[in-house]
Image (spheres, grey):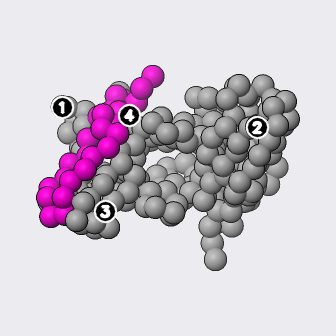
């Protein structure tokens, strides 16, 4: 069953802790994206990656980090430097440059206590 | 820079009424525009894209370059259309989304 798997679905973190959200895809897509979804603000791009070992900052990259060591995986780390990390995080992918349809994961909800 | 604007946070209509969800964009060049939809407890998914000039689930959207708009329309709304709708624009390899409009179709 092809698609994008995000884990965990729910995550609680204490202030000052880093947390990593997992995003795995078996669609053989080259490009992967991380978005943050907040009520009334829609989706905002955090980071994206077009190929393995390469990634670019989006509009709100501060306080976040990513890696792309494998084509299938694009984990997002929410660091303690992120001032307002409580949010819903969405991972998406598409086959590559020129592609214009995003496939989304189910999302991960992070709550900072 | 604000690239995609959806002015309505919530739109409520009665079943059978026409519906129009507004989307305006700012972009130099020829834009690639999309509508994505998120039904309750489902993943965000593509509804339609302007280059296909298609009608999906009775919805259409026409690109108006003069007004820089890409409004989503349906002549007769159904209860199952209730969802969150996002207008999106592709800029090179990045996709930018509006803030979304929640459509509520009342029986």
Distance from disc 3 to disc 2, alpha carbons, whole Å, reads: 36 Å
| Magenta-drawn stretch contains A3 | no
| Residue where numbered disc 1 is placed | B66
Is residue B97 rendered to the left or right of residue B77?
right
Asked if the residue at tag 4 contacts the one at tag 3, i.e. Cβ–Cβ closer than 8 Å, the answer is no
The image shows residue A76 at horizontal and vertical percentages of 74, 43
Q: Which numbered disc, 3 or 4, marks the residue that appears first in the sequence?
A: 4
Distance from disc 4 to disc 2, alpha carbons, whole Å, reads: 33 Å
| Residue where numbered disc 4 is placed | B4
Q: Which numbered disc, 3 or 1, marks the residue that appears first in the sequence?
A: 1
Residue A2 sits above or below residue B22 on the image: below
Residue A113 sits above or below residue B46 on the image: above
Residue at mark 3: chain: B
Circle 3 Cα neighbour tier, 10 Å, few/some/many (<14 / 14–19 / ≥20): some
| Residue where numbered disc 2 is placed | A113
| Residue where numbered disc 3 is placed | B81
Quadrant housing the C terminus of chain B: bottom left
Q: Which residues are magenta?
A: B1-27
Where disc 4 sits, the SS reads strand
Residue at mark 4: chain: B
Check if mark 3 and mark 1 are on a common chain. Answer: yes
Asked if the residue at tag 4 contacts the one at tag 1, i.e. Cβ–Cβ closer than 8 Å, the answer is no
Q: Which numbered disc, 1 or 4, marks the residue that appears first in the sequence?
A: 4
């Amino acid at each position: 069953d092809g698609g994008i798997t995000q884990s965990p679905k729910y995550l609680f973190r204490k202030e000052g802790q880093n947390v990593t959200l997992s995003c795995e895809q078996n669609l053989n897509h080259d490009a992967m994206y991380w978005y943050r979804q907040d009520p009334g603000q829609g989706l905002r791009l955090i980071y994206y990656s077009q190929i393995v070992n390469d990634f670019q900052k989006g509009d709100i990259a501060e306080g976040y980090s990513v890696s792309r060591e494998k084509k299938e995986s694009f984990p997002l780390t929410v660091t303690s430097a992120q001032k307002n990390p409580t949010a819903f995080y969405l991972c998406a992918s598409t086959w590559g440059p020129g592609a214009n349809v995003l496939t989304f994961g189910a999302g991960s909800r992070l709550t900072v206590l | 820079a604000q690239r995609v604007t959806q002015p309505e946070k919530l739109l409520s209509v009665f079943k059978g009424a026409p519906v129009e969800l507004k989307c305006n964009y700012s972009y130099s060049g020829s834009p690639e525009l999309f509508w994505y939809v998120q039904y309750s407890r489902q993943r965000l998914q593509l509804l339609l894209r302007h280059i296909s000039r298609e009608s999906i689930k009775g919805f259409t959207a026409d690109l108006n370059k003069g007004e820089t708009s890409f409004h989503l329309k349906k002549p007769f709304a159904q209860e199952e259309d209730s969802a969150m709708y996002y207008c999106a624009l592709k800029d090179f390899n990045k996709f930018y989304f509006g803030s979304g409009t929640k459509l509520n179709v009342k029986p």
